[in-house]
Image: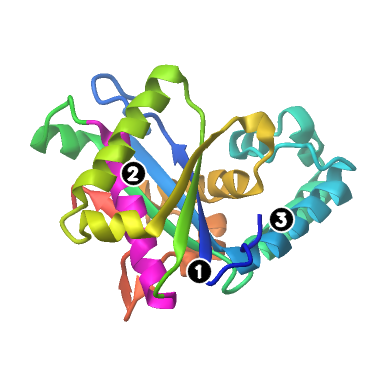
């Protein structure tokens, strides 16, 4: 999945979520929805995938293990080995080494704070689609900083036939209408394929998007609480001239 042999630079955007998108009934202890984009330049992708696969072979002797944030936190399934403190420390050191690499990826994310959101807006809002707009928009901003003619391939995990169809419709409306800051023509010129993947497809970028989405969400909910995982990735959030553009919080 590295850059093709043409004149255009290629970027890959892997999107994952943290929390659910329900506004009618939501967990008051986790009143947030985050959509997180993990943006990788095509010329960096193969090395990143190799690093993760090497890491999987080292710990599990199996590249087919799916790295899943919840299973890691709960120490379940293949990650039950993390119940041993020495193994757990080595595991987190290895993950942090991968995520701490400079210039390999950029994070663009959007979080919906549900309680103030429903007070200000309608409960019928499509928070997934709204978040997708911001994530794609900020990814394009980031690409604009680095290349004049790059294209963006988007990968997202399947959620179900109905949900996937609704998301694809929202994506197509985004292509047709643009955003407040990006014209439809500019979006179309940037966007390439929009691909739904199954978890079993073992897409490395989606697994890394899953890893970074939880600590970002926890930071937004409790910014003063110690969050070592967030400290590893905080400098990867897209900034421009000192302004943090890669973390959109709604409402804010």
Predominant SS of the magenta segment: helix
Inter-mark Cα distance, 3 to 1? 21 Å
Res. 131 image quadrant: top left
Residue for badge 3: 49
Around disc 2, counting alpha carbons within 10 Å, would you say few (fewer than 14), some (14 to 19), or many (20 or more)? many
- The region drawn magenta spans 126-147
- Which quarter of the picture shows residue 105? bottom right
Q: Residue at x 39, y 18 (%)?
A: 162
Q: Nearer the viewer, residue 231 or 184?
A: 184
Q: Nearer the viewer, mark 2 or mark 1?
A: 1
Q: Secondary structure at mark 1?
A: loop
Which quarter of the figure is the N terminus placed in? bottom right
Residue of label 2: 132
Any magenta on residue 127? yes
Residue furthest front in the image? 6
Q: CA distance from mark 2 to mark 1?
A: 24 Å
Quadrant of residue 92 within the rendered picture: bottom right
Give the spatial CA distance, label 2 vs label 3.
Answer: 24 Å
């Amino acid at each position: 999945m590295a850059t093709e042999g043409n004149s255009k630079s290629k970027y890959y955007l892997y999107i994952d979520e943290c929390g659910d998108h329900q506004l009618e009934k939501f967990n008051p202890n986790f009143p947030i929805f985050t959509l997180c984009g993990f943006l990788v330049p095509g010329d960096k992708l193969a090395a990143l995938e190799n690093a993760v696969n090497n890491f999987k072979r080292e710990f599990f002797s199996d590249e087919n293990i799916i790295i899943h944030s919840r299973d890691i936190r709960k120490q379940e399934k293949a990650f039950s080995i993390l119940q041993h403190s020495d193994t757990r420390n080595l595991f987190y050191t290895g993950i942090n080494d991968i995520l701490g690499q400079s210039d390999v990826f950029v994070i663009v994310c959007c979080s919906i704070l549900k309680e103030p959101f429903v007070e200000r807006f309608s409960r019928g809002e499509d928070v997934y689609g709204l978040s997708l707009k911001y994530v794609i928009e900020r990814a394009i901003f980031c690409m604009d900083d680095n290349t004049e003619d790059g294209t963006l391939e988007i990968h997202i995990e399947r959620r179900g036939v109905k949900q996937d169809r609704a998301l694809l419709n929202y994506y197509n409306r985004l292509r047709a209408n643009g955003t407040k800051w990006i014209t439809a023509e500019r979006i179309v010129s940037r966007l390439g394929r929009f691909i739904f993947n199954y978890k079993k497809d073992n897409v490395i970028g989606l697994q890394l998007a899953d890893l970074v989405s939880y600590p970002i969400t926890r930071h937004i909910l409790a910014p003063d609480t110690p969050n070592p995982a967030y400290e590893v990735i905080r400098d990867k959030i897209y900034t421009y001239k000192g302004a943090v553009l890669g973390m959109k919080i709604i409402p804010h």
